[in-house]
Image (cartoon, coloured by chain):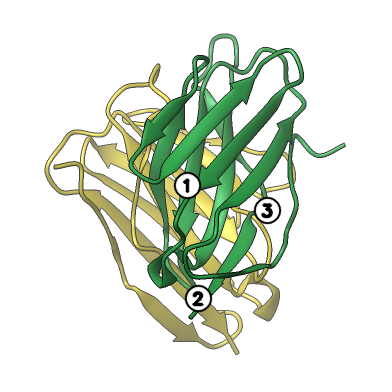
Chain colours: A green, B yellow
Amino acid sequence: RKEVEQDPGPFNVPEGATVAFNCTYSNSASQSFFWYRQDCRKEPKLLMSVYSSGNEDGRFTAQLNRASQYISLLIRDSKLSDSATYLCVVNKPLVGATNKLIFGTGTLLAVQP
Amino acid sequence: GAVVSQHPSWVICKSGTSVKIECRSLDFQATTMFWYRQFPKQSLMLMATSNEGSKATYEQGVEKDKFLINHASLTLSTLTVTSAHPEDSSFYICSASRFRSTDTQYFGPGTRLTVL
């Protein structure tokens, strides 16, 4: 089983649509969760951290369910500029060593005009 | 703040040559730097973690003699791909964090390596 699993998509949605991405992780000891955005042939950029109580940043809402080891990202009112690959990222705590980040393979979003 | 640069942004080389990639934190001191590799349509895979002044810790399956990592200062880490082969062609991305205990990593723009 992969440490972080995502639906690869692609998700093709019209402008203005609401779209949701899901992610599951296998390490119950993970404490930090993130959504990154990666444009084609570019480095990943942090979109938002995900907190236990859920958090919102403008049109983006992230949720975390620790019991189910499940993370979600909701994008409302999709824009053309939201087209990218969205990476679910989870930390892997290591005793006596630097924590690692584990990246999902990403979900490709294509917003159509 | 928290800008990370990489150089070169792309490189094409012949099989058997060595390629050095630099990763710099421009406006902060990076205690820890990470090197990732990303093949097309795949996720970022961590290759190694390096703490300033220490030997790098390599992930399973990554040859330390082939991918030489040096983190001699708090603002610079280098990755040297020795005797590169076409299968080493990939997108190499570094990231840096201020502290060992933090999960916040700042990513460089990546280096696209093509080995002919």
Out of B8 and A23, give the one closest to the viewer. Answer: A23
Where, by quadrant of the figure, is residue A3 drawn? Answer: top right
Q: Are marks 1 and 3 in contact (CB under 8 Å)?
A: no
Residue B96: x and y in percent read 34, 40
Q: Quick check: can you spot residue B64? A: no
Residue A1 numbered tag: none
Q: Which residue is mark 1?
A: A36
Can you give x and y, in whole percent of width and height, for residue A7 in the image? 75, 52
Task: Please tell me which residue lies in front, A31 or B27.
Answer: A31
| Residue A79 in the image: above or below residue A57 | below
Which image quarter: residue B72? top left
User: For residue B113, which numbered disc appears in the image?
Assistant: 2
Q: CA distance from mark 3 to mark 2?
A: 20 Å
Amino acid, disc 1: Tyr
What's the residue type where badge 3 is placed?
Thr
Q: Secondary structure at mark 1?
A: strand
Question: To which residue does mark 3 refer?
Answer: A105
